[in-house]
Amino acid sequence: MALAMMNYTFERSDFVWQLGLYIFLFALYYISIYQGKIKFGLKEGLIAAIALRLLLLPAVPVLSDDFYRFIFDGQLIANGLNPYAFLPVDAVDKIQGQQVHEYWGHLLSQMNSPEYYSVYPPLHQLFFWISALVGERLIWNVVLLRLAILFSESLNFLLLYKIIKLKNLPIKPLWLYAFNPLVILELTGNLHFEGFVLTGLLFGFYFWEKKKVYPSALGWSLASGLKLTPLILGPLWLKVWPENKVVKFLLVSAILIAIFLMPLFFGNGYLGFLESFRLYQSKFEFNASIYFVIREIWAGMVGYNPLIYLGPILSMVTLVSIVVFSYFWKTESFSRLVQGAVWIYLIYLLLQPVVHPWYLIPAFGIGVLIQNRIFLFWTGLVFLSYGAYSGVEVEENFVLIMIEYFILFFVIISAFKNLKPFSVSPNA
């Protein structure tokens, strides 16, 4: 009932109601799943998890407006236009002429980035195009996107279960993922594709454990082709493969990622993509932690927002930190590989100027395999960031952000104190 109310009754601006309902859902999840108060079999659990997602099938997302851009890009491709080569306004003029159809006008008015070229990689665009196959019908565009995401969620359930069986783990990690309210809301509800990223990562980790180079490379390449973020795991992958296999892994991954990104070079589309990517890195800030602290100190000294400089600097610091971490991290077991990947995601997210709630899902999804508490608690805390949308204008509530990160850093410090080689089973 609470899940339905969040998606069908209240808007994003109704933050107090949305937060109250989310707290209820997360508390229920924490008590029933994390603390294990409710027990059910595999079949019953999967049916319940899928049913919760199907409850949202016809819902138009209310917590995020990103899906308007997804559908818009898909319609451009269906009309033979390159979303990296046309700004939305120019594209609508080219398709509709002087009279803008209500459907296109609605997409244009609701999207949050009408003045930028698309920043979503080509593999991501494939799903946008699929959503356009039903024509200019918004609700059916949404349903097709949601069905694609439900497919990825089904794959995630399957891969988590196969890894659990392979490593002789308890079934609990599957339920921690399947019933997490943030996962349900941000993937099935808000139509974000981090679930597909998780599918690729789980696929890669599963076949690493089975010592199969090519399928493992395929999994990581698919994740990286859909969202570029998984490339941060590159240094760790170099560390975990033996010398006789690392070259094969690198070669296959490089070829596949190049193929997935090749459409960027059609009609010089890469120029628009890179322009929007640079703008994203130097203009936007949301729900950051370390970045906000440095920004306030820097701005107090120079009298202006240093994002244009601070963004690239933190990106370089992130890269160096990940390379150094990967070099020194011991990866002698599956659990250590997964644990290393989770720590890399944590380094990345803590140093970013933009941390949307759905960014946590890939790290959380792999983290359940090692019972990582950091991302589990963060999936509860991060909903506080939606306080930015409680007014007419998007304005972050820094009190809520401070609460979020104060608690999170307490959890991180506790986890860091206990950091040691992790073993979840005798054959981990």
Image: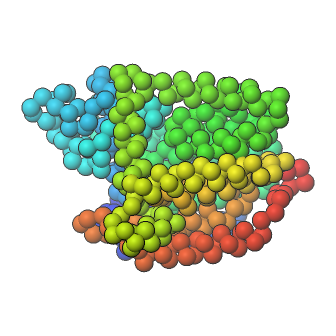
**Please, is residue 275 above or below residue 382 in the view?**
above
Q: Quadrant of the N terminus?
A: bottom left
135 left or right of 21 in image: left
Q: Where residue 156 sits: x, y (%)?
A: 62, 44
- x 42%, y 50%: residue: 281
Residue 425 image-quadrant placement: bottom right
317 left or right of 8 in image: right
Please tell me which residue lies in front, 348 or 308: 308
Please tell me which residue lies in front, 228 or 128: 228
Q: Which residue in the rendered view is the most extreme toward the right?
A: 426
Residue 23 visible in the snapshot: no
Number of labels in the image equals 0
- x 71%, y 53%: residue: 325
Q: Where residue 59 sits: x, y (%)?
A: 37, 51
- x 61%, y 57%: residue: 347
**Please, is residue 184 above or below residue 416 in the view?**
above
138 left or right of 375 in image: left
Q: Where residue 148 sits: x, y (%)?
A: 48, 38
